[in-house]
DNA sequence: AACGTAGACCAACAGGTGTTGACAGTCCAG
DNA sequence: CTGGACTGTCAACACCTGTTGGTCTACGTT
């Protein structure tokens, strides 16, 4: 009985600091990437001491893990009119990437760090492949088709949000849906070529 | 008149060392990526002193630039039967990526370093967009279509050669051509959706 | 009011980085 | 044979990194 602070998580005095660190970490990681975003810089932004970061998040990797914890969340996503699932998926990913700048960092880091790469893969493993299976494909086929879909959207994300090729950035949102929608649709529903 | 060594480049005694450095650098960059591939490690592999690297290549960035200098080389690439250009392009990129492991490193670095990103973009700017123009598209359209094609092949390269998603690695070469060929074909030749 | 504890700070460590300069061996032209 | 230029080596510099232990402060409970 510690009075107001039960053993279930109560409002600790340090919560504000924790949040400040996490916010600063997100910004720094997004702006500078993993390597160049130093703990010292993050601490400076959060106006605390670097050692606090270690105290609350263990180490740099732990901080990064919590900073980029994003829910891919193509949750229920009912199979829709089925002729529109391609366009629906593309729209979904587009908003996801535009709302979460951390995804670009996750991808930047994934290019170097296997752990981050695995986190990206989990989207394929736990979301896209099951989705392909729900569309009636056999395991092997589902795996191939899901890989093609992920490759499609990640390719766009790469050129548009990570490498920032002007030609890719210039594309309009609906323009992308119009071009990529049918592609994903074909990967998911067309018979094997 | 320096005798055998004219002012045009002659066989210097240090050429062997230069080559050894470059070879070791390629291996290390491919294996470890840019940051983790230290000059000391490269020098150790080449069995020379780290200072030689600086002497011959100026700095680490210069060494990297020469180590990953690859010719994208979709050179003449006649417009073919035109119904086959999609598949032809996909095949071309596939062999290019399988023969040059350095491309994966270039992409890893491009995710972080703007200079490397720009080098990748140059392929789009100087090769794909002109190709789209040769197919009869107006500048703006050519830019969009070329961006989609590059996004397609880079997406595959990302999941297959950089992130190494098992589902993407498992795809067979001709399987990829069969799926991605029509996609690229459509991006290049289909009317606007 | 006194105390124990958690929050925050400071200074330092140990390790690794790219890079530089001074020195020794080697080859070839004069 | 004697310069001087070219290769190569050694040791050190200056810097920055993540991380740690000790110390002060202030709160909340007893």
Image: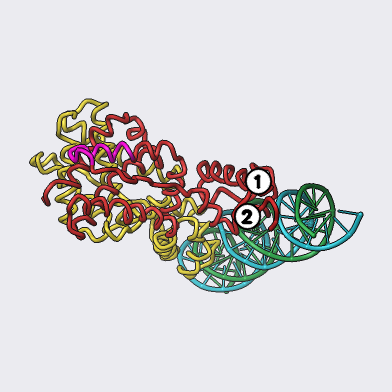
Chain colours: A yellow, B red, C green, D cyan
The answer to whether residue A154 is left or right of residue B139 is right
Helix, strand or loop at disc 1? helix
The quadrant holding residue A76 is top left
Task: Give the labeled residue for mark 1.
Answer: B17
Q: Which residue is mark 2?
A: B56
Main secondary structure along the magenta-highlighted residues: helix
Q: Residue at x 34, y 46 (%)?
A: B75
3D distance between C-alphas at marks 1 and 2? 9 Å
Which residue occupies 32% across, 29% down?
A: B172
| Image location of residue B8, percent across then percent down | 59, 55
Q: Secondary structure at mark 2?
A: helix
Please give the chain letter of the residue carrying mark 1: B
Q: Are marks 1 and 2 in contact (CB under 8 Å)?
A: yes
Mark found first going from the N terminus, 1 or 2? 1
Percent x, y for residue B118? 39, 58
Residue A72 showing in the rendered view: no
Residue B32 relative to residue A90: left or right: right
């Amino acid at each position: 009985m510690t009075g107001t602070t039960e053993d279930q998580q109560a409002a600790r005095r340090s919560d504000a600091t924790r949040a400040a660190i996490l916010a600063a970490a997100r910004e720094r990681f997004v702006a500078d990437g993993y390597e160049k975003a130093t703990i010292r810089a993050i601490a400076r932004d959060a106006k605390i001491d670097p050692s606090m970061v270690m105290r609350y998040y263990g180490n740099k990797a732990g901080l990064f893990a919590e900073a980029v914890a994003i829910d891919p969340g193509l949750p229920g996503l009912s199979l829709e009119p089925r002729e529109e699932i391609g366009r629906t998926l593309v729209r979904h990913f587009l908003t996801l990437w535009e709302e979460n700048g951390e995804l670009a960092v996750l991808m930047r880091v994934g290019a170097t760090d296997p752990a981050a790469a695995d986190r990206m893969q989990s989207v394929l493993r736990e979301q896209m492949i099951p989705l392909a299976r729900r569309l009636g494909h056999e395991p092997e086929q589902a795996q191939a088709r899901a890989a093609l879909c992920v490759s499609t959207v990640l390719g766009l994300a790469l050129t548009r949000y990570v490498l920032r090729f002007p030609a890719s950035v210039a594309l309009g949102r609906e323009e992308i849906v119009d071009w990529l929608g049918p592609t994903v649709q074909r990967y998911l529903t067309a018979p094997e070529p």
